[in-house]
Image (cartoon, coloured by chain):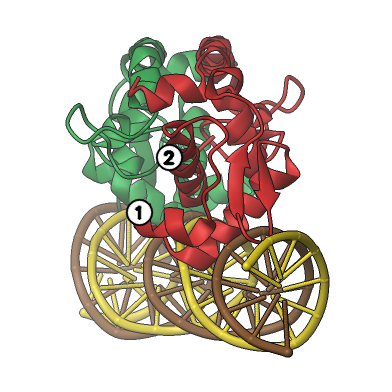
Chain colours: A red, B green, C brown, D yellow
Amino acid sequence: MHLRRETEYALRALIFLAQRPKGSICSAPEIAEALGIPGGFLSKIFQRLSGHGLVRSHRGRQRGYSLTRPGAKISVREILESIEGMDLFERCVFWEERCGDRDPCLLHRDWSQIKPRLLARLERKTLADLARGN
Amino acid sequence: MHLRRETEYALRALIFLAQRPKGSICSAPEIAEALGIPGGFLSKIFQRLSGHGLVRSHRGRQRGYSLTRPGAKISVREILESIEGMDLFERCVFWEERCGDRDPCLLHRDWSQIKPRLLARLERKTLADLARGN
DNA sequence: AGCTAGTGGACCCAACAGGTCCACTGAGGG
DNA sequence: CCCTCAGTGGACCTGTTGGGTCCACTAGCT
């Protein structure tokens, strides 16, 4: 766990896209400006999101990025994992090194009791929920 | 959340103390040696634990540290907070900056649903439990 | 052809975790 | 009464990494 700034930016940028008419295309500089995020950095972030199929890029006249799916079909979990890596939820809240059932950390039990609940919430929660302010 | 290495060392050292006859005094170098923790660093850690009243220091002939209370009376939460700071559980799992009910982070709701459960567990769990391998 | 933004790699910088060093303190033993 | 060893605490060092910039290149419209 413990998310990077990058992931916060990703969420905010995706929310921005989700809040406008479906299929809208916005450029990275445009979104960066609107949200107060450094432009070059946001470009990088979109590249990653694009690699994971959450957004599609467009070049030429109408350039920028658009969502590949409606916000209600994109789970928060998916977004987090796109940026943080697919092993995000294998990692431990307490210490970064992943602690599995073998070689557990001292507090492994405690986290493993709690984790599934959190995971379920983030799985269920969608970009559309976030865009609605939930 | 997200604990430092220091905190892991603290837990291990305290477990070490809890596992020997009550009132035992062990020196930092001795414990460091036994647990494979850098000596100078462990001294620092004990100083903090001592400042928070979890251990007492002894000088002179019989020197070292001893627990001030039986392990069953020291909660894991207390230990974590001693090292990480009292605001540990006000911090957010997701992003480091504390996110309260005002100015919440994007995932504040989700964490605030889960947190009390984790907190309760760590409050209930004691050093004695850890020493017993739980 | 030229404009602008996407692409992707190299790179830079500050902050901080993790850990070392050192000079000082204090209690007991010879 | 001084030596010894650990506790005390502050200064300091260092490698990693998160956060962000730069630059050369590509692609699609006008």
* Amino acid residing under circle 2: Phe
Q: Which residue is mark 1?
A: A34
Is residue B55 found left or right of B30 in the rendered image? left
> Mark 1 or mark 2, which is nearer the start of the sequence?
2
Q: Amino acid at mark 1?
A: Ala
| Residue D11 x/y as whole percent | 30, 81
Left or right: residue A2 versus residue B34 is left
Alpha carbons under labels 2 and 1: distance apart = 9 Å
Residue A90 visible to an observer of this rendering: yes
- Name the residue carrying label 2: A16
- Assign a secondary structure to mark 1: helix
Rendered-image quadrant of the N terminus of chain B: top left
Exactly how many numbered labels are in the figure? 2
Residue B18 place in picture, x, y as percent: 46, 25
**Secondary structure of the residue carrying numbered label 2:** helix
**Marks 1 and 2: in contact by CB < 8 Å?**
yes
Vertical placement of residue B13 versus A45, above or below:
above
Residue A96 vertical position relative to residue B125 in the rendered view, above or below: below
Within the image, what quadrant is residue A99 found in?
A: top right
Q: Is residue A36 shown above or below A117? A: below
Q: Which mark is residue B88?
A: none
Label 2 marks which chain's residue? A
Q: Nearer the viewer, residue D30 or A100?
A: D30
